[in-house]
Image (spheres, grey):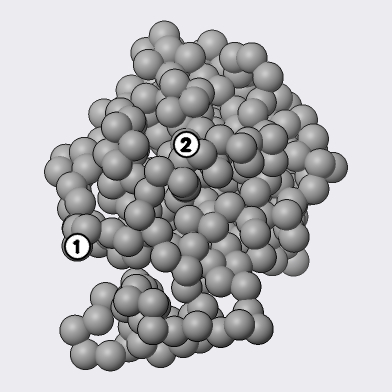
Amino acid sequence: MIGRYAPSPSGDLHFGNLRTALLAWLFARHDGGGFVLRVEDVDTGRSSMESAERQLEDLAAIGLDWDGEPLYQSTRSDAYATALASLDTYPCYCSRKEIQEASRAPHAIPGSYPGTCRNGAVVNPGKSPSVRLRSSVASFSVQDFFAGSYTGDVDDMVLRRGDGDWAYNLAVVVDDAYQGVTQVVRGDDLLPSAPRQAYLASLWGLPVPEYVHVPLVLNAAGKRLAKRDGAVTLRDMDLSWARAELARSIGLQPASPAGLLEQFDPSKLSREPVVFKNPIPE
């Protein structure tokens, strides 16, 4: 078994990111499996090498180790191009606003692409199109650790953006297979992407990893924790406090990485979100 953690280097990791990373490590190492890192820097407008380096330093600081060198998606364009060329695709000139408005129509799936450009009728010579998959299914069933059989929507997803950057769904599937990843541990907010990624893997004849979706860390208002909530990154906190609080947030007693592995039982992990209590008074 090989697990992974794959952060996007757009800033320092916050407490919720670090908790998910620790859980991914615990799931993998608990079973004696491998654990790899991937820097998901395909979004060239938001990613930076400085951010990636700081994230790797923070992961090591909370006690995580990984096998081999981290894989940078920015080095993988040729692999993505080869994968894209094997699929049935079409250009799309729709803006996000147009897609959002179309998805509000009766019986439309919120947020999904309605197929406006699918028949080639829409052309905008002044705009660089994105590239979309011509999907042949409406939904796809995957196995999820907590939910058993999970079926979700599969639309004509973007595989390459209009600005030339590679889309998350394409890159993550290609790279999970390349790194031999068999288990993906990530936040509940990414659950809707599992059917899309499983479907892409099936088109390429690739194995589908086991998807483990874990509860998010929330702020005091009950919303998803974000960097805008203040002192939520490791560099804002006392390291010893942060390591202890990460352990407690998973239901474990603070300990060394080896000690956490001895305590960890995936079946006992709570399905309730964690509310972050900022250690620095406002």
Q: Residue at x 42, y 65 (%)?
A: 90
Percent position of residue 142, x then y = 22, 43
Tag 1: amino acid:
Ala
Q: Is residue 157 above or below residue 246?
A: below
Image quarter in which the N terminus is found: top left
On screen, 215 above or below 226? above
Q: Residues within 10 Å of mark 2 (few under 14, many from 20)?
A: many
Q: In the rendered image of this protein, does residue 156 appear above or below residue 96?
A: above
Left or right: 234 as drawn, with respect to 21? right
Residue 239 visible here: no
State which quadrant residue 79 falls in: top right
Q: Earlier in the sequence, mark 2 or mark 1?
A: 1
Residue at the spot 36% in from the left edge and 87% down from the top edge:
102
How far from the left and from the top, in percent, is residue 58? 73, 33
Please state if 11 lies on the left or on the right of 244 as rendered. Answer: right
Quarter occupied by residue 281: bottom right
Tell me how far mark 2 sits from mark 1, CA to CA: 22 Å
Given residues 33 and 76, the one toward you in this image is 76
Q: Nearer the viewer, residue 38 or 126?
A: 126
The three-letter code of the residue at mark 2 reads Val
Q: Residue at x 66, y 65 (%)?
A: 163
- Which residue is tagged 1? 138
Badge number at residue 174 = 2
Q: Nearer the viewer, residue 1 or 93?
A: 93
Quadrant of the image occupied by residue 73: top right
Q: Is residue 174 left or right of residue 71?
A: left
Instruction: Find numbered disc 2 in the image and state the secondary structure of the residue it sits on.
Output: helix
